[in-house]
């Protein structure tokens, strides 16, 4: 890339908290971009491991790297801290447990130069390191797990309603007031929704790919999606008009399965209960067929549990959040996460 095409400074932000295992690789993948005119902001949410020390060591050899503190820990605070400190024309978010190819920023800048887009993002390719993790990674790339979340499996560029780890013009993000600091989960979708409501469009480009370390245990995956479901309820309270049929699928599933289980306990209703379980069984069978070729034989037993963790975690999170709100309770700080993206 010529010097003139790197004339615009780009700010890359990496929210992090206790990411000593992956932060070095994440920062190195950003520092090694073909587009070199970068301001690299690592926003640390009070790490208690070696995260800060690793970043400080990297700063010695690369003055583009800056380390900022985030006492409130949650991601929307980190993004707003970075937005306030950003000197670039565009701001690119990169997850602390991920790695990006060397042309990642260059491709994003190329897309922005057309002037057509309010946000640009690409494929979020899950990476597993354990038997469960590799099964989870395969499942997360399936339409049967993620519905119409195109960024998990899309192969063609298109306009979408949400992008993971999005890139945005700095001035546009500032004009929207940044990220909602009351939206501790699902903050990225909520921001994208306001951006679209302001008249701008989001581009999904499959040539822009980020390798993202997914959860490595099914139990952790369930907890993650339970938080996502609860975060979606918070978004819907703020923006009820953003409700879609996809948002209702998992909570309806959970309610239906619960009803079927109750029917199974009665002698007269047992057959009806079994019939109620059949549609979801068909979904799990189709999902397994869709992903089994991507998983080694010894890892295949985790496919169905991974699908169920996503579906039931999301649906359970929605219902728990609804009950909490009905009881007049807030979600609290337990909703926060140091990194990650929601659908």
Image: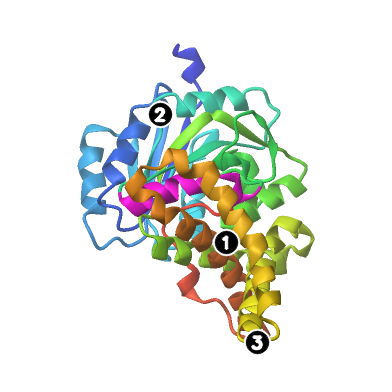
Q: Are marks 1 and 2 in contact (CB under 8 Å)?
A: no
**CA separation in Å, label 3 and label 1:** 28 Å
Q: Main secondary structure of the magenta part?
A: helix
For marks 3 and 2, the one nearer the N-term is 2
Task: Judge whether residue 197 is colored magenta.
Answer: no
Q: Residue at x 59, y 77 (%)?
A: 320
Q: Which residue is mark 3?
A: 267
For marks 3 and 1, the one nearer the N-term is 3
Q: Secondary structure at mark 3?
A: loop
Q: Quadrant of residue 256?
A: bottom right
Residue 291 x, y percent position in the rendering: 50, 43
Foreground of the two, 319 or 144? 144
Decide: few, some or many residues near mark 2? Use Cα within 10 Å; few <14, some 14-19, many ≥20.
some
Decide: few, some or many residues near mark 3? Use Cα within 10 Å; few <14, some 14-19, many ≥20.
few
Q: Is residue 103 above or below residue 141?
A: above
Q: Quadrant of residue 103?
A: top left
User: Which span of residues is magenta-colored?
Assistant: 130-147
Q: Can residue 96 be spotted in the picture?
A: no
Q: Residue at x 59, y 48 (%)?
A: 286
Q: Secondary structure at mark 2?
A: loop
Q: Which residue is mark 1?
A: 311
Q: Which residue is mark 2?
A: 101
Q: Residue at x 41, y 34 (%)?
A: 100
Q: Residue at x 45, y 53 (%)?
A: 303
Which tag is nearer the camera, tag 1 or tag 2?
A: 1
């Amino acid at each position: 890339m010529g010097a003139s095409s790197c004339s615009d400074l780009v700010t890359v932000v990496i929210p992090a908290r206790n990411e000593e295992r992956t932060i070095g690789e994440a920062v190195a993948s950003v520092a090694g971009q073909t587009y070199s005119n970068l301001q690299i902001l690592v926003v640390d949410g009070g790490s208690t491991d070696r995260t800060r020390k690793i970043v400080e060591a990297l700063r010695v050899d690369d003055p583009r790297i800056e380390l900022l503190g985030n006492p409130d820990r949650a991601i929307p605070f980190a993004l707003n801290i970075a937005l306030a400190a950003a000197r670039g024309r565009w701001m690119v978010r990169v997850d602390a447990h991920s790695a990006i190819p060397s042309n990642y920023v260059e491709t994003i800048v190329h897309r922005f130069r057309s002037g057509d887009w309010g946000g640009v993002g690409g494929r979020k390719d899950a990476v597993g390191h354990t038997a469960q993790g590799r099964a989870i990674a395969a499942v997360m790339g399936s339409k049967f797990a993620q519905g119409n979340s195109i960024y998990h499996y899309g192969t063609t560029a298109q306009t979408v309603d949400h992008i993971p780890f999005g890139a945005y013009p700095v001035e546009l993000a500032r004009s929207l007031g940044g990220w909602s600091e009351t939206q501790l989960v699902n903050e990225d979708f909520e921001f994208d929704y306001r951006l679209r409501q302001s008249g701008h469009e989001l581009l999904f480009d499959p040539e822009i790919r980020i390798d993202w370390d997914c959860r490595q245990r099914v139990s952790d995956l369930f907890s993650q999606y339970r938080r996502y479901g609860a975060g979606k309820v918070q978004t819907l309270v703020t923006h009820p008009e953003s409700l879609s049929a996809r948002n209702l699928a998992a909570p309806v599933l959970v309610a239906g399965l619960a009803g079927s289980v109750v029917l199974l306990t009665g002698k007269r209703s047992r057959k009806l209960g079994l019939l109620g379980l059949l549609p979801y069984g068909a979904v799990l069978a189709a999902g397994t067929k869709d992903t089994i070729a991507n998983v080694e034989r010894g890892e295949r037993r985790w496919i169905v549990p991974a699908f169920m963790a996503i579906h039931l975690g999301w649906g359970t999170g929605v219902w728990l959040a609804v009950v909490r709100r009905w009881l007049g309770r807030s979600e609290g700080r337990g909703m926060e996460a140091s990194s990650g993206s929601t659908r």
